[in-house]
Amino acid sequence: MLTRSRRETVTFRYPFRIKGVERQLPAGAYEVVTDEEMIEGLSFPCFRRVATLIMVPAAPPHHASTEMISISSVDLADAQQADMAASHD
C-alpha cells in the first residue's frame, strides 16, 4: 500500500491544550506530520488520513528533548480555533 507523509508548521499565539497531551503547551511553532495511505481500486489517486502527529517539547525535566505525539486532526483544528478566538478577545 502506498503511503505518504505531509509536514506543516502550525503556530499558536497563546499557550494551549490539546487532547492527547496531558499538559499545557507554550505558544510557538509546532511541526505537524500527517500520514496518509492511498485508497486502492479507484480510477484516480485518492488518499485518506491514517495518523496525525505533533512534535512538542518533552515534559520536565527533559526540556531539551522533543516528543512526537499522536493526536486527532479534529482536536488539532479545535485547538487552532480556540487560539484564533483568544486573539480576538
Image (cartoon, rainbow, N blue to C red):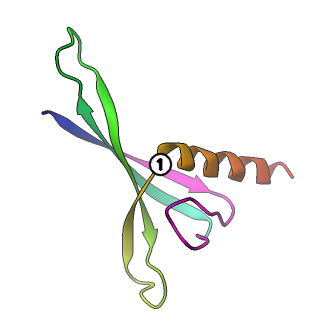
User: Compared to 65, does 76 lie above or below?
Assistant: above
> Residue farthest to the left?
1
Q: Position of residue 55 (x, y in %)?
A: 41, 63
In what quadrant of the picture does the N terminus appear? top left
Residue at x-position 63% and y-position 46% = 78
Residue 35 left/right relative to 72: left
The residue that mark 1 highlights is 72
Look at 19% across and 37% down and name the residue there: 3
Frontmost residue, 80 versus 71? 71
Identity of the residue furthest to the right in this view: 89
Q: Main secondary structure of the magenta part?
A: loop
Q: Would residue 9 be counted in the magenta stretch?
A: yes
Counting from the top left corner in percent of width and height, residue 79 is at: 62, 52
Query: What is the x, y in percent for residue 7?
Result: 36, 47
| Residue furthest bottom as drawn | 61
Image coordinates of residue 57 in percent, x first then y, are 46, 74
Q: Secondary structure at mark 1?
A: loop
Please give left or right for residue 38 compared with residue 25 in the image.
Answer: left
User: Which segment did they paint magenta?
Assistant: 7-25
| Category of crowding for the residue at label 1, using alpha-carbon neighbours closer than 10 angstroms: few (below 14), some (14–19), many (at least 20) | some
3 left or right, relative to 53: left
Q: What kind of residue is marked 1?
A: Ser
Judged left or right of residue 84, residue 88 is: right
Q: Residue at x 32, y 31 (%)?
A: 48
Residue nearer the viewer, 45 or 14: 45
Residue 10 falls inside the magenta stretch: yes
